[in-house]
Amino acid sequence: MLPAFVQARKSLLTPFNLITGVILLAGLVVTVLRFTGGLGAVTRLDDNNPWGIWIGFDLLCGVALAAGGYVTSSACYIFGLKRFHSAVRPAILTAFLGYALVVLALHYDVGRPWRLPYPIFLSQGTSSLLFEVALCVFLYLTVLFIEFSPAALEWLGQRTIHRLVVRLTLVLTIFGVILSTLHQSSLGALFLIAPSKLHPLWYSSYLPVYFFVSSIFVGMSMVIFESTLAHRYMHHKMDQTHIDESDAVAISFGRAAAFIMMAYVGIKLFGLALDHNWHHLATGWGLWFLFELLGLVFLPALMFAVAVRERKLKLIRWAAGLAIIGVVLNRMNVSLIAFNWHLPVHQRYFPGLMEIITSVFIVTLGVVVYRFIVTRMPILSEHPDYGGPTH
């Protein structure tokens, strides 16, 4: 029989831990280079492309993919759909980590990260969309922290504070929905100031509506996707309630997502007609636009509809994955791919290796923290001393 320390070392040397360790080490090296050598040492940003992958992916996609928090909590506590109760805590945790990582990513992107609190506390520019986004993200991150705290308080055995926070559940949910509505749409509104830079197929006065509506169905898709991964890799941490309710949550969210995605396709086509941009569909950009809209929104909507009717859970999960890819591609198109589309190829932005390493590092860090929390706190199970989770 092997000694205890040898067994412990072997348990740590798993493929997941080895790959994660390499990514984290590489990310830390790039982090040191970024904060000692400045933006120029690690990015390909310039005057034509002041926003790169750290904004396009880490921020725009991160905020959209974290929408499952407000979607699930509002369904459970505002609309009274208690059958989604077991999905709330995982969704809130994912949203909290998502927004926390967005703020972390901003420290890499902003030239003077120590000035990030200035717009909120010192120099409010109340007519600026960036101020509104910053304020809403700051407030919503605080709300998510409080919404997540009951799980941590149960783990720590803090009953008094736990009871106080639980009483605020409905108020926090309503406040969170209001803040999410504001900043999800405002992220789209940011690009309204660039009609000459963003391709006409993606530029529209309805951009705020597009961003908000797409955040709803991608939030539902993320809940389905996260539940799929949790069942596969964290099944031993789930109690019977979470196992029994997960299929019903996937089917209900798949049904709702199908309707919302069809509405999104209709809104996009309406915006296209209103701006008289049909002729662009006959170009290469038009084919790319149709691939995004039909291949990664309309198709998964149909898949959701068929899967819900036939109760095919595997198809629902595939549709959720396609929907997530579709929203990620949309955010990347708006912020990077279709942005500055008129410039020559050699002047277009493409992220450098260290920028990509940083983004992968931030995502990996989120996965590690999520895994740490789920294995220790009552996220996928009910705490026996508290009569089940309240979030």
Image (cartoon, helix red, strand yellow):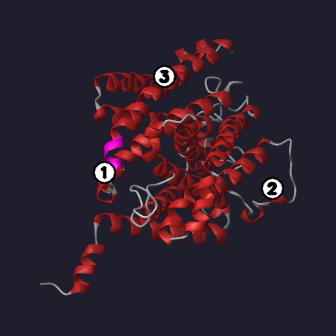
Classify residue 126 by image quadrant.
Answer: top right
Question: Answer yes or no: do the residues labelled 2 and 1 have beta carbons within 8 Å?
Answer: no
Q: Foreground mark, 3 or 1?
A: 1
Q: x, y percentage for residue 346? A: 59, 42
Residue, x 64% and y 40% (percent of image)?
A: 177
SS at circle 3 = helix
Crowd around label 1: few <14 · some 14–19 · many ≥20 (10 Å): few
Residue 329 in the image: above or below residue 109: above
Residue, x 58% and y 16% (percent of image)?
A: 269
Instruction: Give the number of the disc on residue 259.
Output: 3
Q: CA distance from mark 2 to mark 1?
A: 44 Å
Q: x, y percentage for residue 259? A: 48, 22
In the image, the segment drawn in magenta is: 240-246
- Report the side of 126 relative to 11 (left or right): right
Residue, x 72% and y 24% (percent of image)?
A: 205
Residue, x 59% and y 30% (percent of image)?
A: 213
Q: CA distance from mark 3 to mark 2?
A: 38 Å
**Sequence-wise, which precedes: disc 2 or disc 1?**
2
